[in-house]
Image (tube, rainbow, N blue to C red):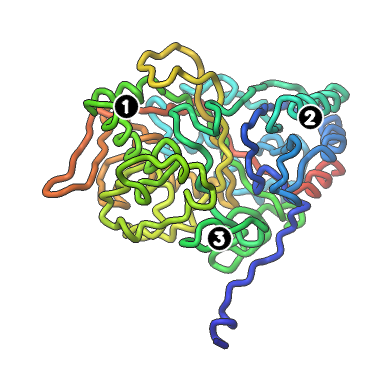
Amino acid sequence: MFLKKLFKRTAEKIELHDIQAIILRDRPLPYHGVNVFLEILHTASAKAFLKEIVPYVTNAQNWWDNDNAWLSIAFTYEGLKKLELPQSTIESFPDAFKKGMAARSEKLMDINENAPEKWDAVFKTAGNHIAVSIIAKNMDDLNSKKALALQVLEKHQGVKLCFQADFDTPIEGNFNHFGFRDGISNPEIEGSGAEQLNSKERPIKAGEFIMGYNNEAGNYYPMPQPMEFAKNGTFVIFRKYHSHVAAFNRYLKEQAKNKDEQELLAAKMIGRWRSGAPLNMCPFKDNSALGADATKNNDFDFSNDQNGKLVPYSSHMRRMNPRNSKMAVMSDVNLHRIIRKGVGYGPALPNGSTKDDGKERGLYFIAFSAKAMETLEFLQREWVNSGNFMSLKNEKDPVIGLNEGKGTFTLPGEPLPKRFTGMPTFNTLKGGMYLFMPGINAIKWLSEL
């Protein structure tokens, strides 16, 4: 008993009042929002803008309270340079952050149809300095916070609006464009104050996601200096994907002979039924009640499915969080987790349609990690666009992998596995960037430099 008490993990106290809400706070349902990129034309004007806007930045003190819109701010490396940070601070950022996502495309496997030269124009400009995001559960709250932010922006002519994109829940009930429940599986974080919903996994140390706290190894990850600037901040992954929903529906119909088999194949590719119910908890039929129950739909591991017959090794869910799977290439899963807060954009395609209507729709993939650049490069290279870690050779993620019409998806079975071939890319990358999201006190510090 003494030893158990001696080695018991203790959660650090997290300064929730200084952490931006979007990092830890549950996304409202339904959600409505806007992403804005700003260009800094004059440093003094930009600092005055930050000083005036920072009171509207929502903190994570009461992260479960979705009664209002919340506003967040992050900065690109070029934006931080424009704010004239001390040279020692500028030089202390990781090299991958300085170079930017496009320059690291080979390491990210952002090649061929996902290559930077094919990205949307807004992601090719050097003028993206400040990113502002507002998200709310209703349009009234959103419009109110947008109006406040716009009033502040209009006072400061040295900050220019260069991009604005609205987003909404793609399908009512928190379903993405492919018809699957979204935003289910995020890591539980020590000290966040959130209820632990997965009894099979322990909460992860806060330092994996937020700077200035212990990570899983019991120390701090390298962070920008001084520490007072970096603490309670994090790095942001921002990627825009175009979703080929009609192609996904066509592939299901080409590979499976009836509706039930199509739904099963789709569930095998994702790892969950459309409701969000995990396959290893209901392998033969969807369970909408389970899928909608946040206290149960993520409370599992793969102890009952080490051979992958229920949830294929190559499924999207199992790739992005192998949990306690036996992997050919061993890795501590908790070192590669990210907090995801992706949002959908564009109108939904009619249910089951196999004809592309030519409209823009997809996902703004937004994620947070104290070592975001390193983590994303690992995930893209090892878990998304390779199968080696699960002894699947060149097999890629069926949902977000770069399959390009040559993808293979394997269902383990006896005496022989079943393989689906000719899989196209269902999500094409249209742009991306890395950002630094400071703590709220650090934004004040920036405004007063």
Label 3 SS: loop
Q: Is residue 271 above or below residue 299?
A: above
Sequence-wise first label, 3 or 2: 2
Give me the residue at 42% from left, 44% from top. 277
- Which residue has dot 1 on it? 424
Q: Is residue 122 left or right of residue 180?
A: right
- Which residue has dot 2 on it? 145
- Distance (Cα) linking label 1 and label 2: 40 Å
In the rendering, at what x and y percent does residue 378 appear? Answer: 44, 48
Disc 3: CA contacts within 10 A as few (<14), some (14-19) or many (>=20): some
In the rendering, at what x and y percent does residue 158 appear? Answer: 82, 25
Task: Tell me the amino acid under the disc marked 1.
Answer: Pro
Q: Is residue 413 above or below residue 142?
A: below
- Distance (Cα) linking label 3 and label 2: 33 Å
Task: Tell me the amino acid under the disc marked 3.
Answer: Ile
Q: Is residue 181 left or right of residue 420?
A: right
Confirm or deny contact between disc 1 and disc 2 (CB under 8 A). Answer: no
Give me the residue at 32% from left, 32% from top. 263
In the rendering, at what x and y percent does residue 408 appear? Answer: 25, 35
Label 1 SS: loop
Labelled disc at residue 204: 3
Q: Is residue 131 left or right of residue 407?
A: right
- Closer to the camera: disc 1 or disc 2? 2
Task: Tell me the amino acid under the disc marked 2.
Answer: Lys
Q: Is residue 100 left or right of residue 14?
A: left
Sequence-wise first label, 3 or 1: 3
